[in-house]
Amino acid sequence: MTPLAVILTVLGYIAVLFVVAWLSGRRADNAGFFTGGRRTPWYLAAFAMIGAAMSGVTFISVPGSVAADAFSYMQMVAGFTVGQLVVAFLLVPTFYRLRVVSLYEYLDARFGVAAHRTGAWFFFLSKMLGAALKLYVVCAVMQLLVFDAYGVPLWANAALTMGLVWLYTQRGGVKALIWTDTLQSLCLVGSLALSVLFIMRGMGWSAADVVREVGASPYARVLFLDDPSSGRYFWKMFLAGIVLLVAMTGLDQDMMQRNLSCPTPRDAQKNIVLTALCQIFVILLFLVLGVLLYAYVERRGMALPARSDEVFPLVAVEGGLPVFVGVLFVVGLVSSTYSSAGASLTALTTSFTVDLLDGVKRYDERRLTCVRRRVHGALAAGLVGLILAFGYWADDSVINLVFRMASYTYGPILGMFLFGLATPWRVRDRWMPLVAVAAPLLSAAVQWFARERWGYQIGFELLIYNAAFTIAGMFLLLKRHEK
């Protein structure tokens, strides 16, 4: 697949995306930007959430990860499913009852301004880093496929990508995202399914052959119950999946903006349950694709790339398959990227404007629109800078790096919400920033000590330790004789 073919594919997709974004967001006001006006049908939100949950990192990293981790990711997916139920039946009724625009307004009502700002700042840090890391992966692939051939540097690549994301989200916000995410979900799932089909045909396999070969592959092992010290141990990944889902979806402004755009809590709950079921099958298909990719590389005698994240691009673009496979890869990659990046930028804008600037209370509608657009543009520029920083630093499988960062940055948010929902007590709010900073530092110290002293590897369940330290710190801040 030539660089010109990649460019034409990307431009074609972006043209369709901009038309959908313009049609759906042309009459959006601030309420439409922040919450979609709470008029989104639940089934539309559920389909949109597939694209929202599956970023470009998922599209590239999950298939490539099977060589090192087999199907162990499904253990975490089982935890994700339980976590979705927690979000649907515990958090959603609370957020609808309070009619929040930003999730972190709950912390203000429950504890005070300092807790509210602390939760918002930790979300801001988490989402900026996570969004930039996911965008970096896609920019790196596009650099390899297109921009290097024309001598275009990474900074121009990143600026162009974020400029397009800024353009299609700057007016419509959540109202536009629901419809653009629906388009992106359709492209993502279609690209995934057709890629599997073409690779099957490239090896001369039938559906029965795929089931047999995948089942017999050492990469298809799902359960890891033999070594509790391993990062892939079932109970560690299952429990980590529950808390990661609750933290990264239920307490994430980005993901919950779509759920809270439904008219009623009942609609939001139906949307979340359907999303959970779809997520199981889509991720399983990604892992099956990973087995097929490695089998194809072996059969063709191709050299494996240095990084697992490059296996899918290698096979799709240079593997001798029909050009249409490369087109599917690019469409799937671009669709998942713009879905994730657009949603992240919208959520960051919402949280910064509502939580950190207190914009809804301070400004009238006209002034709020002006402030929101300035914040939106400034955050887009900030993401470009972070993408370039990751270009010099990221060297791990990115799906692992995303979850590892989330274990540190979402822990204080999870701890604060758990304490607020499970206890009637109030705390001395002004000390909450200190607790929130101390918890990740203590978690990192425990992780290092367990590895050095006992050889015990704390994996994604680090988030549990982090939240526990936050809760313990809040108990130290209890207001005596007051509930």
Image (cartoon, rainbow, N blue to C red):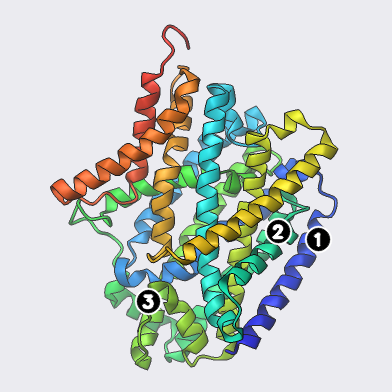
- Residue 347 place in picture, x, y as percent: 63, 47
Residue 366 in view of the camera: yes
- Name the secondary structure under disc 3: helix
Gap between marks 2 and 3 measured at Cα: 36 Å
Q: Quadrant of residue 325?
A: bottom right
Amino acid at dot 2? Trp
Give x and y (percent) for residue 328.
Answer: 59, 79
The label on residue 143 is none
Q: Nearer the viewer, residue 257 or 282?
A: 257
Which disc number belongs to residue 166?
A: 2
Residue at horizontal 35 percent and vertical 76 percent from the top: 214
Residue 19 relative to residue 397: left or right: right
Q: Measured along the vertical axis of the image, is residue 397 above or below residue 260?
A: below
For the residues labelled 2 and 3, say whether their Cβ atoms are less than 8 Å apart.
no
Q: Is residue 217 left or right of residue 343?
A: left
| Callouts 2 and 1 close, C-beta under 8 Å | no
* Number of numbered discs visible in the structure rendering: 3
Can I make out residue 251 in this image? no
Q: Which one is nearer the viewer's eye here, 392 or 145?
A: 392
Q: Residue furthest top?
A: 481
Q: Which residue is labeled 3 in the image?
A: 291
Q: Name the residue beneath numbered marker 1.
A: 22
Q: Amino acid at mark 3?
A: Val
Q: Residue at x 63, y 39 (%)?
A: 266
The reply to whether callout 1 and callout 3 are in contact (CB within 8 Å) is: no
